[in-house]
Image (cartoon, rainbow, N blue to C red):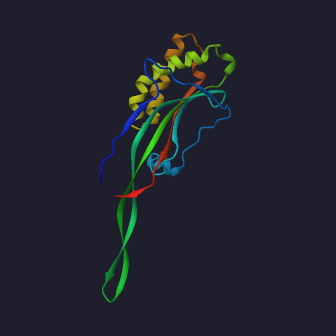
Amino acid sequence: MAVSEIDVEFEFDEKTDLVVTEVDPDFEPKEPDIEHRMLGGVDGGGDFGFYIGAATGGRRWEMKVLKIVGWPEVKSKTCYKKVKIPFDGWTKVPYPCLWRRTCERSWFLTITHSDPSDLPGNIEEIIKDCAKMALIPAIPILLTGNAAGAAAAFLEAFKTCLLTKGVQQVTKFSVGFDSRAECGPWKRV
């Protein structure tokens, strides 16, 4: 099996700004199904993520944080081999077989504030600045696939930055990292 190269593309750096988009206020973060919880989102190859904080509705912003090209995924399935047995019979014998595919996986950051009336007029600029700073401790954790750890690290740094910029209602913010993937077909190894 040839090893494919993984390429990580960051959506911002010190010289560029994050692109912040306000999203639908009725957005509901989806709960991953049991298969995604057990397999860490690997088998489905679809969307999964983690949200943390008190806000369940209100004003919501989203930004694309990074894209990983060549993200490898593997799974194991039970395959069967037909085996001849004595007295002219046949039986199917189970054995594990591996499958692989590569995906282009993008990670998005969602920030929600439950009470928009509390926010200053320049909140989008404040969110850009604080998100950029708070992503520094979160990105390495996110690259390991640990969306929960990345969200916790981001939220602490984000709240600290908001307080330094004069935003008082930091407990009304919640954040989440959401992975979205476009995957190729499964191929047997």
- Of the 4 image quadrants, the one containing the C terminus is bottom left
Q: Residue furthest bottom?
A: 87
Among the 4 quarters of the image, the one containing residue 80: bottom left
Specify whether 168 is left or right of 155. right
Q: Nearer the viewer, residue 105 or 59?
A: 105
Residue 155 picture location, percent across and down? 50, 24
Q: How many marks?
A: 0
Is residue 50 depicted above or below 157 in this figure? Answer: below
> Residue 103 appears at what percent x and percent y?
44, 45
Quarter of the image for residue 96 reads bottom left
Regarding residue 86, the answer to whether it shows in the image is yes
User: Which residue is depicted at the point 63% across and 37% down?
Assistant: 28
Q: Is residue 137 left or right of residue 160?
A: left
Instruction: Measuring from the top left, give residue 95's x and y in whole percent.
Output: 34, 66
Specify whether residue 169 is in view. Answer: no
121 is higher (above) or lower (below) than 188:
above
**Residue 19's spot in the image, x, y percent?**
54, 25
Instruction: Say which of 17 and 157 sits in front.
Output: 17
